[in-house]
Image: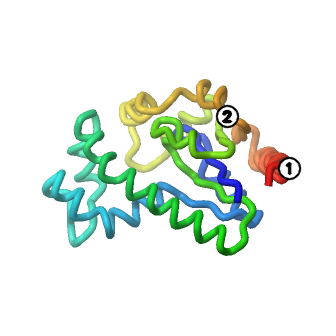
C-alpha cells in the first residue's frame, strides 16, 4: 500500500482537500482529529500531569492548554513529546487497517508533516496551498482567531514556498473548488502508476 502525506499551512484548504480524497474512496487519517480523540482519552493523564489544571471533566480543555503553551517553546516541546508519539501510533493502526481492507493508497493528513520529520516516511507528499491574501482571509474569519495568533502559528510552520518546493504534488485551492478537484484527480491518476 502506498502511503502519501498531505500537508499545508493553516488556512490553505487542507481539510477540504482531504475530503476530496475521501470522496474518491481513499482512506484518510486526520492527525488533528486524532489529537482531539487523544485529548478525550489516552493523552489526558500525561498532559494533565505535565500541565496541571488543563483537564476538565476528563478531557483536555484546549483553551486552558493553549494558555500554558502558546508562545512558550519549551512547554510546546514538552506537549509535542507527549502527543506526537501517540499520534504516530494512531497512524500506524490506521495504515494497518487500511491495508487489511485492501486499500492500494492511503493518505496521512499531517499539518506539521515537514516540521516533525514525517515527510521521510511518505512515498509522496502533497502540499495544499493558496495565495497569502486568501490564506489570511480564511484564517481571520475563524472564531477566536486574531492576527497575532495567526502570525504566531505561521512562525512555527515551514514557509509555504519551502513546502511547495519539497512537495511531489501541489494542490492550489485559491483557484476554486472545481479546480482543486481537478488537481486531486490528476494526482490520483499519477499515483496509480506507483501502486
- Left or right of 106, for residue 154: left
Q: In which quarter of the image is the N terminus?
A: bottom right
In the picture of the structure, the residue carrying the numbered disc 1 is 193
User: In the visual, does 152 lie left or right of 114?
Assistant: left
Residue at 65% x, 36% y is 129
Q: Is residue 39 among the parts visible in the rendering?
A: yes
Q: Quadrant of the C terminus?
A: bottom right
Residue 23 visible at all: no
> Alpha-carbon neighbours of circle 1 within 10 Å: few (<14), some, or many (≥20)?
few
- How far apart are the two marked residues, 2 and 1, measured between alpha carbons? 18 Å
Query: 10 Å neighbourhood of mark 2: few (<14), some, or many (≥20)?
Result: some
First of labels 2, 1 by sequence position: 2
Q: In which quarter of the image is residue 37?
A: bottom left
User: For this view, does 146 lie left or right of residue 53?
Assistant: right
Residue 100 percent location from the top left of the image: 65, 73
Question: On screen, 77 above or below 61?
Answer: above
The kind of secondary structure element at disc 2 is loop
Q: Mark 2 points at which residue?
A: 167
Q: Please report the residue visible at 21 percent of the width from the left and 44 percent of the height from the top.
A: 68
What residue is shown at x 80% (from left), y 49% (from top)? 194
Residue 40 lies, in percent from the top left, at: 33, 68
Amino acid at each position: 500500500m502506498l502511503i502519501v502525506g498531505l500537508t499545508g499551512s493553516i488556512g490553505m484548504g487542507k481539510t477540504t482537500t482531504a475530503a476530496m480524497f475521501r470522496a474518491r474512496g481513499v482512506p484518510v487519517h486526520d492527525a488533528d482529529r486524532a489529537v482531539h480523540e487523544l485529548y478525550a482519552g489516552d493523552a489526558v493523564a500525561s498532559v494533565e500531569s505535565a500541565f496541571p489544571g488543563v483537564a476538565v471533566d476528563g478531557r483536555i480543555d484546549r483553551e486552558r492548554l493553549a494558555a500554558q503553551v502558546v508562545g512558550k517553546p519549551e512547554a510546546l516541546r514538552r506537549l509535542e513529546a507527549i502527543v506526537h508519539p501517540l499520534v504516530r501510533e494512531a497512524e500506524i493502526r490506521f495504515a494497518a487497517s487500511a491495508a487489511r481492507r485492501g486499500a492500494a493508497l492511503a493518505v496521512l493528513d499531517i499539518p506539521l508533516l515537514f516540521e516533525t520529520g514525517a515527510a521521510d516516511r511518505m512515498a509522496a507528499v502533497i502540499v495544499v496551498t493558496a495565495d497569502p491574501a486568501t490564506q489570511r482571509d480564511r484564517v481571520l474569519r475563524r472564531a477566536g482567531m486574531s492576527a497575532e495568533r495567526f502570525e504566531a502559528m505561521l512562525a512555527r510552520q515551514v514557509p509555504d514556498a519551502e513546502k511547495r518546493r519539497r512537495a511531489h504534488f501541489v494542490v492550489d485551492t485559491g483557484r476554486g473548488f472545481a479546480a482543486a478537484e481537478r488537481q486531486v484527480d490528476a494526482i490520483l491518476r499519477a499515483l496509480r502508476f506507483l501502486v
